[in-house]
Amino acid sequence: MRASRLVSLLLLLQARGRMTAGELADALEVSVRTVYRDVESLGAAGVPVYAERGPAGGYRLLDGYRTRLTGLTAGEAEALFLAGMPGPAAELGLGSVLATAELKLRAALPADLADRGARLRQRFHLDAPSWFREPEPTPHLAALAAAVWEDRRVQVRYRRWKAPREVTRTLDPFGVVLKAGRWYLVAAASGQVRTYRVAAILDLAVLDEPAERPTGFDLAESWQELAARYERSVYRAEARVRMTVAALAQTTYLFPPAMSRAAQENAGAPDAAGWVTTTVPIESVRHGCVEMLKLGAQVEVLTPTELRELVASTAHALAALYPPSGDALPRGPRAGDAPARESKAGDAPMAGTPGRAPAIEAVFRR
């Protein structure tokens, strides 16, 4: 353990130059006293490390000194092979580069470590896209990644979901992010940092202008903030609902994560019939209707009134399409048809509904 720490201390000084004892202690997660002892040990072993006094002082290596120590532990070698992502790397235009790098790494490693790395790649695989979703075409991704790497400004023609549908923007690109199989660009337009879906970029031109990248910009931190802001902006309303305990469990698989999480966190204790009351965020009345219908007769909307009425009218329309008359083929309502009958006590519950959950018409009877 101590030998590994000494190697880390040496490599830190080699990579970063001058570092104070406090900075080394933070990087190595040890005490300052331990750093003092480790520096003395390196000096005793012949490593030319020395201390500079004063406010801007610290430890550093003698100018020109470079260690050729390249030993890797088994875990480190495995981690390097696991870090390779053939699919995303190929989309970025780096597939052949990654393959070549892996060949060089395997050739440079001792035989036992190279074998461990190869075994790891045969046992772990990254498949980024979500289930039942085709990968999005991103013909401009490689050129965009090159512009990000070279800090070049880009001009894009972009397809938006709101009017005007197509816009042209000049962007300072900061980085690309792969989220659930979809690529996003984090960039600044007119000084404001935003995200852009790479698949929605219709045309791309890399400009001969340097991008203005903020000092200290952290892509991972910025992405987390942007993603959280997006989730907050999407869910602009709430719905108060009753649902069965079984339906509450099913929200994990049927609702978007933010809705499912809120439904379970806000749920009260179940009543004698096995129903709970909870509050869920919704994007709009129409979006809420689509999500609630996934649970069939196992959910009842209490508020808002507009959502309850929309779900009720949809339920009545569905009941009219599927009357319990035994018709060979379902048909839509026609002029002169009698109104669809309302459910009565004793009706069989909907398929998949636990216990005696009411039929969907009865839940939303007005």
Image (cartoon, rainbow, N blue to C red):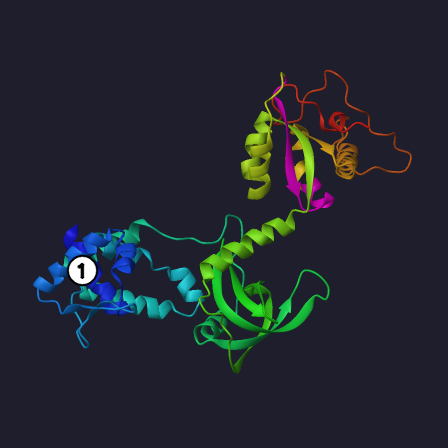
Left or right, 108 with reference to 210: left
Badge 1 crowding class, 10 Å Cα cut-off, few under 14, some 14 to 19, many 20 or more, is some
Give the number of marks. Answer: 1
Of all residues, the one furthest to the right in this rendering is 336
Residue underneath mark 1: 7
Task: From the top left corner, tell me how far across and down residue 69 is, in percent.
Answer: 16, 65
Q: Nearer the viewer, residue 104 or 288?
A: 288
Is 283 one of the magenta-colored residues?
A: yes
Give above or below for 3 relative to 13.
Answer: above
Q: Nearer the viewer, residue 328 or 108?
A: 108
Give above or below for 202 relative to 75.
Answer: below
Say what secondary structure mark 1 lies in: helix
The image quarter containing residue 53 is bottom left
Task: From the top left corner, tell me how far across and down residue 263 is, in percent.
Answer: 59, 35
Q: Nearer the viewer, residue 38 or 255?
A: 38
Give above or below for 128 relative to 146.
Answer: above
Can residue 104 be seen here?
no
Magenta segment: 273-290
Can residue 226 be seen here?
yes
Is 53 one of the magenta-colored residues?
A: no
Task: From the top left corner, tell me how far across and down residue 168 is, in percent.
Answer: 65, 73
Q: Amino acid at mark 1?
A: Val
The quarter of the rendered structure image containing the C terminus is top right
